[in-house]
Image (spheres, rainbow, N blue to C red):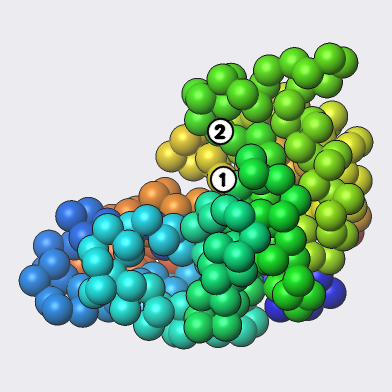
Amino acid sequence: MNRQQLVEEIRRKKSYLCVGLDTDLSKIPVHLQSRPDAIVAFNKAIIDATLEHCVSYKINTAFYEAMGRKGWEAMEETVHYIPSTHLRIADAKRGDIGNTSTQYAKAFFEAMPFDAITVAPYMGSDSVQPFLEYTDKWTIVLGLTSNKGAADFERQKMGDEYLYEKVLRTVASWGNPSNLMFVVGATQADAFLNIRQILPDHFFLVPGVGAQGGSLQEISQKAMNADCGILVNASRAVIYASGNGDFATAAGAIAAQYQHEMAQYLPQ
C-alpha cells in the first residue's frame, strides 16, 4: 500500500486507526484456548469485526515468535488474511548490519506480504537502507517512544538538540515521506508540535492510546497534517475488550468508537 492509497483509505473511512494484533494465548477467551488454531481463529474474528473501522493492522512479532514454529505459522496465516486494502505492519523492530537487515527485509517483504516494518536506527544508515530499497514498502523507524527508558537515551541532550531529534532529522534524509514513517509514542504528546515542525510531511505510527493512557484528541490536534499523517495504534483496548464469547463484537464496538471520534478530528 503506497502513500496515496493509505491517504485515500483514511479519507474514505474517516479513520486512522491501526489495530494491534498483540495476541497472547493466555488472554484470549477460554473457549478458544484449547483449539490448535486458537491464535488464528481469534485474529480472524478480530479482523472481521474491525475491518470497516480501521485502515491498518500491526502484528507484534514477539507474541508469535515466542511460540516457536506454530507462532510463526500463525503470524503468516494472519497476515495473509488481512486484505490488501489495509496497511499490514510487522512490528518487529529489526535493525542490524547491512547483510543481516537485507535478510530481515526479505523475510517480511518477500516471504510474507507485509507492507511495513518497524526498525531500530541505533546502528545507522547501513542497517536501515536494505528496508528502504523496497520502494513500494514502508520503513517505520523508532523516533520517540512511550516507555520510561526513553529518558535513558532518546531524551538525552546532544549539544543543542535531543538525541531523538537528531535521529528524526538524520533518518529523514535516508528516505522520503512516501517510504518512511516514524514511531512516536502517544504519551509523549507535548513533543508532537516540535516533531511536526521537524517532519511536516511524514506519517507517524502512534502507539500508547488506550491502555497506556495517551489522549486521542490531544495527539490528533498536535500531530495531524493535511494528509492526516498519523496512524494511531490501539491493541489491548480493542482486542481484549471482552474475554467472553462476544469478544469480536466488543472489539468491533470499541474500534467503531475510535473511528467515530477520529472522524471529528480529520481535516475536512
- At horizontal 61% and vertical 84% (from top left) the residue drawn is 84
Instruction: Give the residue at mark 1.
Output: 207
Q: Please indicate, yes or no, whether residue 124 appears anywhere in the rendered image.
A: yes
- SS category of the residue bearing label 1: loop
Where is residue 253? Give x, y as percent: 45, 61
- At horizontal 84% and vertical 54% (from top left) the residue drawn is 174
Neighbour tally class for label 2: few under 14, some 14-19, many 20 plus, Cα within 10 Å: some
Where is residue 228? Give x, y as percent: 81, 56
Residue 211 versus residue 228 in the image, above or below: above
Instruction: Give the residue at mark 2.
Output: 146
Query: From the image, which quarter does the N terminus lie in?
Result: bottom right
Could you say which is closer to the camera, residue 95 or residue 184?
A: 95
Asked whether, in this view, residue 263 is left or right of residue 40, the answer is right
Name the disc covering residue 250, or none: none
Could you say which is closer to the camera, residue 143 or residue 243?
A: 143
- SS category of the residue bearing label 2: loop
**From this viewpoint, which residue is outermost toward the left?**
34
Q: Quadrant of residue 105?
A: bottom right
Are the residues at dot 2 and dot 1 in contact (C-beta closer than 8 Å)?
yes
Sequence-earlier tag: 2 or 1: 2
Query: From the image, which quarter does the C terminus lie in?
Result: bottom right
Q: Amino acid at mark 2?
A: Ser
Q: Amino acid at mark 1?
A: Pro
Asked whether, in this view, residue 267 is left or right of residue 83, the answer is right
Where is residue 231? Give x, y as percent: 67, 55
- At horizontal 33% and vertical 57% (from top left) the residue drawn is 63
